[in-house]
Amino acid sequence: MNSKASRHRAHTALTGVLVTAVLVAGCGGTTSSTGGPVRWERIDPSPASDEGPLEIVAWGDAYVGVGAHSAWTSPDGRTWQATPLPDAGDGGATALVALAGQLVAVGSVSMRATAWTSVDGLEWQRIPDDFDLQPAPGFASTELSRVTAGPVGLVAAGTEWGDRGQHPGVWRSADGRDWVRATAPPGGSGARDILATADGYVLAVADNARTGEMTHAAFWFSSDGLEWTAAPDIHSFGNAEPQGLAVRDGTIVAVGYRVTSTGLAPMVWTSTDGRAWAPAPDTPALAWWPFPGATPVGGQGALQGTAMSNVHTGWSGFIAVGSHWGLDPSKPQPDGSFALAIRGGVWRSADGRTWELLPDELLSVSEPGMATVKYGLAGVSELGGRPLIVGATPELGVTLWLGPASIE
């Protein structure tokens, strides 16, 4: 990793193995202080496999999740039961939303966007092939990666690939069964997250068309999910990529990463309307962060990347999750290189602009024989209770961490 471009490629490769979601479950719990480690309860949703729910929503007095080929149900966020999704084929579900008496999961099968619906989280139906979900002319495949429920119904975002390259796609639906393609779609090279606000929808997009291998962050807004308008550019959008969106008390927050001279660092933008965006000020919590005790490698720190992956409301503000990764000089390899180390990271903010990186002990694993290095965390949401982070460990695959209801 001798250049910014190679560091960006490493991040892109790593994000392919990051797990994608987080929830908040239950209520009650203890209050903890960041003066010491926040207490988290680790939950293995499927002891017999490395699978588990990647996207979770509250459903009645229980919880429902989806993860690739399965739907997952739980009465308490601790004990999970899997049910196969019908006709998932070589694809699967990537996102889930609850909507007025039913659940809708979106994803892809055989490189075609699709969706599944359920009224109880136990029995699911895959929707019939929908013409508007087929790839646009000049594109060979399409997938839905995020979905949200807003003022005029469901809006799902994804990406299309083909001979014409790739671009974001957006579709709207009243019930999750019949979909309509956006008539004025957003530009860019790939959708990252979509968010419903009080008066419409906001879309975060990565665009590498202008900067070659480096990505350019872009934000789009729409009142109806069909016609999209680009937010004005600002210089801080270059060499950066948004990953997740959240809104609280009229403040919209986007989190992701930016490319610096020393590696990747967390990046945050805020907006009050989805149209005008401003970067959060640089602070130590938004800088790349080397492993404690690691020595520099080639004049750089041992850790070449830190990025936020998702954000949601919680703990009296916003909670963001992400990953730290890089070369660990304490683990030399036979060829003279160093082992790649990855671990999760959790941040919180009261206003979306000033962030605190929570202590490293936050997600430490204490059982004998368990490695403390983890794969990245990729999402967090708040449903009025305790945060339940979805991540992964090298040993167990999908893993959940149930946190306290609040911290001081």
Image: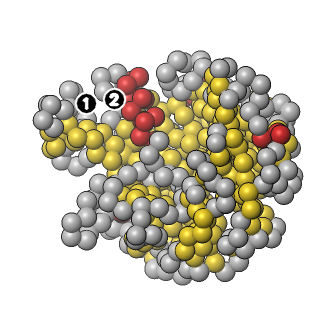
Work out whether residue 287 can be spotted. Answer: no
Mark pair 1, 2: CA separation: 6 Å
Q: Estimate the x, y position of residue 12 in percent, counting from the top left.
A: 46, 34
Residues at discs 1 and 2 in contact (Cβ within 8 Å): yes
Q: Mark 2 sits on what residue?
A: 262
The picture quadrant where one finds residue 260 is: top left
For badge 2, the amino acid type reads Thr
Dot 1, how many residues are within 10 Å of its Cα: few (below 14), some (14-19), or many (20+)? some
The picture quadrant where one finds residue 56 is: bottom right
Q: Estimate the x, y position of residue 116 in percent, counting from the top left.
A: 72, 58
Q: Secondary structure at mark 2?
A: loop
User: Please, is residue 191 above or below residue 119 in the view?
Assistant: above
Q: Estimate the x, y position of residue 190 in percent, counting from the top left.
A: 63, 33
Front residue of 111/343: it is 111
Q: Is residue 153 left or right of residue 326?
A: right
Work out whether residue 210 can be spotted. Answer: yes
Q: Mark 1 sits on what residue?
A: 300
Q: Secondary structure at mark 1?
A: loop
Front residue of 104/277: it is 104
Q: Residue at x 36, y 58 (%)?
A: 393
Front residue of 313/6: it is 6
Q: Residue at x 38, y 52 (%)?
A: 375
| Rendered-image quadrant of the N terminus | top left
Question: Counting residues from the N terminus, which is met first, the one under dot 1 or under dot 2?
Answer: 2
User: Please, is residue 395 above or below residue 220 in the view?
Assistant: below
Front residue of 112/343: it is 112
Q: Estimate the x, y position of residue 247 in percent, counting from the top left.
A: 67, 53
For badge 1, the amino acid type reads Gln
Tell me, what colour scheme is on the image?
A: secondary structure
Q: Residue at x 59, y 18 (%)?
A: 210
Q: Residue at x 70, y 43 (%)?
A: 113
